[in-house]
């Protein structure tokens, strides 16, 4: 790839910040990176201006591991070829050898949930808080008044959705900021979605990330392939142009280095490969330093538009033999491209400088976690019911796999319940909890599962307290105002949902009925009453930052409250 001197500068400027935090000198594209800069770096990513992490000391000195969180977009719970995670329910078209190896080498969570669509999950993970907190306040993508689309029309709706936020508030103490206080260098790559809609103050580089490649308000990639824009190859409209320097067509050297078919030579670069390129480069810079690091890689895959790299599309077509048509083949190939990002990250951790030797490996001191931001939308989630955007299991349940060689034993599974809000306290726990946000200022709603990472058997007993959902609006045919509680403290997973529109309750035993086919609300009235009471207590808790939004009754404009069930 040929680059201009201006591009060389922006490439090196992106990394200069990281290596300054790490306290090292490296050579970036032939330019020595010796002094940290600040501000926005056009075309290569944005870097934050504060250098507080540099004084933290080395990983060895601190004993704190590096942490990498990889999050796919719109990937269904069983849309991966990992028997241990899916219970064998996945379609044979989904071939994900890198995720399969991740599960073999580490720990698979059998009960992991997120929020039902993109932005709310990212807001909950970033803040460690439910949407009911004033500094989160992100309940859904766009608006709580998304009527129609096959669902309740505005004219028929009994309620109006209140105004919500689109970004995590600048007053929030993000997980990145908390980890900075714990001596970490921090970086974000890919989709962010909960910053930049209310101004630059909520962008990743102003929310605790020392490096931001691609993250802003954008909710999906407009294109999956680079193309020529004048004389420059670009991923048009993707990530503020931060991936453009990875956009040149495939070269023979690149393909050889990665072991890809030479048939791709000269063809357009795929966004999955650009995200992988950025991740490999960033890991190399971070690993060269003395500070532990936190890196979150939020891939655009497999959010639409769904387009696979040509060789991965062809392989998927051969597996499917016409089943599901071109659309299914594109999706299975796109999933495979996402899986390659995982493999490249694991390889980069094993050999950060890429010289073929693992003498510089950081694997034993790096926790890697893989998950998705919500349930699947491009293919059935059966045997689970529903899809992305719904509060049924098909919209909420996601894969979660963790590996940490030397700490997590290979081939383990756990029934420990995990929700989006649990990552924040878990990462602080892993980091040593040298600094925690004050409860009076930024309370955390989640529960650490760090003990389960170290000993998976602890996942069964005692189980974490219940997981809660609260949705005061409408999302086309997928969701109406509701409240949900999932409880697993009595050896069974029970899920209770209240629907405002129909003034009705549904109770399912997810242990025996993960597809939510048998409503037990009448036959298990005592369980329903207990769960309803816990939902009521959760909703009515008192704290200056706890301000849940409620659906507004059309007739009066007053908030509609959760009824008491006895």
Image (cartoon, rainbow, N blue to C red):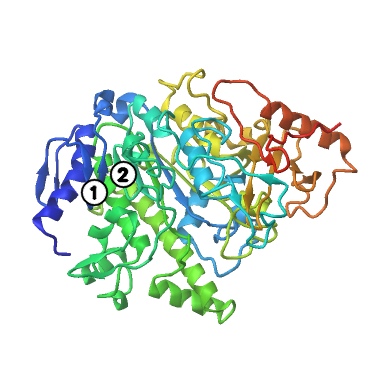
The residue identified by callout 1 is 353
- Quarter of the image that includes the C terminus: top right
Q: Going from the N terminus, do you reach mark 1 or mark 2 first?
A: 2
Q: Is residue 310 left or right of residue 278?
A: right
Mark 2 secondary-structure assignment? strand
Dot 2: within a 10 Å radius of its alpha carbon, few (fewer than 14), some, or many (20 or more) residues?
A: many
In this picture, residue 361 sits left or right of residue 444:
left
Q: Quadrant of residue 430?
A: top left
**Is residue 501 depicted above or below 445 in this figure?**
below
Mark 1 Cα within 10 Å, few/some/many (few <14, many 20+)?
Answer: many
**Is 125 situated left or right of 238 in this image?**
right
In the rendered structure, the answer to whether residue 269 lies left or right of residue 403 reads: left
In the picture, the quarter occupied by the N terminus is bottom left
Percent of width and height locating residue 334: 46, 66
Residue 197 appears at what percent x and percent y?
A: 40, 44
Disc 1, SS: loop
Q: Residue furthest bottom?
A: 322
| Residue marked by disc 2 | 212
Q: Which mark is residue 52?
A: none
């Amino acid at each position: 790839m040929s680059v201009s001197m201006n591009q060389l500068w922006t490439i090196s400027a992106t990394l200069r910040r990281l290596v300054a935090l790490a306290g090292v000198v490296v050579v970036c594209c032939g330019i020595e990176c010796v002094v940290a800069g600040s501000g926005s770096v056009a075309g290569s990513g944005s870097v934050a201006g504060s250098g507080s992490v540099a004084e933290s000391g080395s990983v060895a000195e601190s004993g704190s591991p590096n942490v990498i969180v990889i999050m796919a977009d719109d990937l269904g719970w069983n849309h991966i070829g990992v028997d241990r995670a899916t219970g064998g329910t996945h379609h044979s078209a989904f071939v994900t050898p890198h995720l399969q190896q991740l599960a073999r080498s580490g720990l698979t969570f059998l009960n992991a949930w997120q929020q039902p669509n993109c932005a709310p999950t990212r807001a909950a993970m970033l803040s460690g808080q439910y949407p009911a907190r004033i500094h989160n306040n992100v309940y859904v993508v766009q608006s709580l008044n998304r009527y129609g689309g096959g669902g309740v029309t505005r004219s028929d709706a009994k309620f109006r959705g209140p105004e919500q936020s689109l970004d995590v508030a600048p007053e929030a103490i993000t997980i990145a900021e908390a980890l900075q206080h714990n001596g970490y260098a921090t970086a974000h790559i890919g989709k962010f979605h909960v910053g930049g809609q209310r101004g630059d103050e909520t962008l990743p580089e102003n929310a605790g990330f020392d490096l931001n490649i691609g993250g802003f308000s954008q909710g999906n990639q407009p294109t999956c392939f680079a193309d020529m824009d004048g004389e420059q190859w670009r991923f048009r409209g993707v990530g503020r142009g931060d991936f453009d320097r990875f956009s040149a067509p495939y070269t023979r050297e690149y393909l050889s280095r990665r072991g890809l078919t030479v048939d791709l030579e000269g063809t357009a670069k795929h966004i999955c490969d650009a995200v992988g390129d950025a991740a490999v480069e960033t890991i190399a810079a971070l690993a060269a330093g003395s500070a532990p690091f936190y890196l979150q890689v939020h891939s655009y895959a497999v959010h639409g538009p769904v387009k696979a790299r040509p060789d991965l599309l062809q392989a998927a077509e051969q597996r499917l033999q016409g089943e599901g048509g071109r659309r299914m083949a594109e999706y299975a190939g796109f999933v495979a491209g996402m899986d390659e990002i995982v493999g490249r990250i694991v390889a980069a951790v094993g050999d950060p400088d890429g010289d073929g030797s693992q003498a510089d490996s950081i694997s034993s001191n790096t926790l890697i976690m893989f998950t998705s931001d919500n349930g699947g939308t491009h293919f059935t989630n059966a045997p689970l019911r529903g899809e992305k955007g719904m509060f049924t299991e098909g919209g909420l349940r996601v894969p979660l796999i963790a590996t940490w060689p030397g700490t997590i034993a290979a081939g383990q599974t756990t029934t420990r319940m995990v929700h989006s809000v649990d990552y924040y306290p878990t990462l602080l726990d892993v980091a040593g909890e040298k600094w925690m946000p004050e409860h009076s200022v930024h309370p955390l709603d989640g529960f650490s599962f760090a003990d389960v990472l170290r000993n998976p058997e602890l996942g069964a007993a005692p189980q974490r307290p219940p997981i809660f959902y609260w949705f005061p609006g409408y999302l086309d045919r997928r969701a109406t105002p509701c409240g949900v509680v999932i409880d697993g403290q009595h050896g069974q997973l029970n899920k209770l949902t209240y629907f405002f529109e129909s003034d009705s309750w549904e109770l399912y035993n997810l242990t025996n009925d993960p597809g939510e086919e048998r409503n037990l609300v009448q036959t298990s009235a005592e369980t329903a009453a207990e769960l309803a009471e816990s939902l009521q207590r959760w909703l009515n808790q008192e704290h200056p930052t706890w301000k849940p939004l409620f659906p507004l009754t059309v007739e009066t404009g007053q908030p509609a409250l959760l009824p008491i069930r006895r």
